[in-house]
Image (cartoon, rainbow, N blue to C red):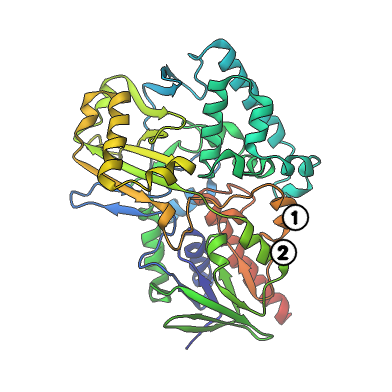
Amino acid sequence: MADVEYCVVGAGFAGLTAALRLKQAGRSVVLLEARDRVGGRTFTEVRADGTWIDRGGAWIGPGQDRIYALMDEFGVPSYQQHVDGAAMMLVDGKQYRYSGTIPWTMSPWAAMNLGAAMLELGHMCKAIPLDAPWEAKEAEKWDRVSLAQWLHSNIASKPAHELLGTAIAGCYTSAASEVSMLFVLYQMASGGGPGFVLGVKDGAQDARPVGGMGAIYRPMATEIGDSIHLSQPVRDIQQDADGVTVRSDELTVRARRAIVAVPLAIAGQIRYEPMLPVDRSFLHQRMPSGSIFKIAVLYDEPFWRDDGLSGQSAAPGSPATITIDAGTNSVRPGVMCVITEGPIARQIGQLEEGERRKLILGELVERFGDKARSPVDYIEQNWSVERYSGGGMLSHAPTGVLTQFGRALREPCGRIHWAGTESSAVMCGWVDGAIRSGERAASEVMEHDTATVA
């Protein structure tokens, strides 16, 4: 049995950050991770030739001060996302090329409809109190409708409807009908509005760490050292008046307090004694993740750049819903990232890998020409079947959840505290939000103990 001050559950960025800050404060900590690696919903693969591929979360942007601070702490530089050239949208068999966030090359009606919807979303986001979105003046109204219902009522143009629906619902790796409009507004507002969420340059995909996310989480893990225990899925957490007992299959940890830093659906698989308060328990049941494939297709060089294309494309309903240039800070190799989310991801997940590869490459050939037909490598990551992620990159709230149970997102349950990007009021859904939540939780447990001693 390990006897420490604090036990952290989950070694994604939230848990790593919490453990790191506790250790740096001179506190004793044990970090238990179910996987055989750290990183959680980020996963950087370094290939034999030194090329690195981010198979999970990858991008950073302005306003994400905490991840930039962590990068400075460990000497990790960033580089700008490639954006030169035309982006592409495919709707109803038509291909539109454009620059910027809005494809103005669509029909004037569709472009105006899309622009007006973006303005309205921005206006609505400003009405969301980030620490308590359920207290917004229109919270009850917005939490009764799904994103799909809002789009149906506010966007008349079919191309604009399909494009915006795909772009927004894709953030939650689910169908637009599955996500509460209040949650959409809260998540967007936490990042500064729809322009940041859906944007590339100066938006959520503005830049990347050199070496990928692994260049950040690996030195964090090194500093935490042998306090990390891998392949230790936590089965139960028991708390009493003096502390908590955290058990995995092989380890038992006795600590003053525990920080649970895993996705909500996974947190719900842990047995708690005594049982958690009803609102927190129900929150675990009601905030699922979605489905997502993230596929890296490697070429000798990024040929699309020479063809005047940025590599960005969107095709609602396609097996390759979104593409983006995912090259490293070196020119070679060319890395095309294909992201497929929600219902389509579940559908292609039923195919054999060879059949799925043929389908994806066919989509890339249609958009980028015959050079896309023969990659040097093809790397799939199906987050939908990751046992300890529970699905996509962000747990989402269906209708009615935030107004009923949102208050339980950050509220400690006795000696059990919560971290994870979903619990961050700023940059909810990004790695930066996960880091913020880990820092908050670390401060929280130390403050509670200081108050108890006082």
Image mark for residue 279: 2
Indicate the position of residue 358 as horizontal and vertical percent values: 26, 37
Q: Residue at x 62, y 26 (%)?
A: 118
The C terminus, quarter of image: bottom right
Q: Hey, which quadrant is residue 340 in on the image?
A: top left
Name the N-terminal-most of marks 2 and 1: 2
Residue 261 visible in rendering: no
Identify the residue at the far right of this view: 137
Q: Nearer the viewer, residue 3 or 340?
A: 340
Q: Position of residue 322 (x, y in %)?
A: 42, 34
Q: Residue at x 54, y 69 (%)?
A: 269
Mark 1 neighbour density, 10 Å: few (under 14) some (14–19) many (20 or more) = some
> Are discs 2 and 1 less than 8 Å apart at CB?
yes
Q: In the image, is residue 205 above or below residue 212?
A: above
> Residue 5, can we see it?
yes
Q: Please tell me which residue lies in front, 351 or 280.
A: 351
Vertical position of residue 451 compared to residue 351: above or below: below
Q: Residue at x 62, y 19 (%)?
A: 113
Q: List the single residue furthest toward the top.
A: 108
Q: Secondary structure at mark 1?
A: helix
Residue under the image location 67 percent in, 72 percent down: 276
Q: Amino acid at mark 1?
A: Gln
Which mark is drawn over residue 404?
Answer: 1
Identified by mark 2, the residue type is Asp
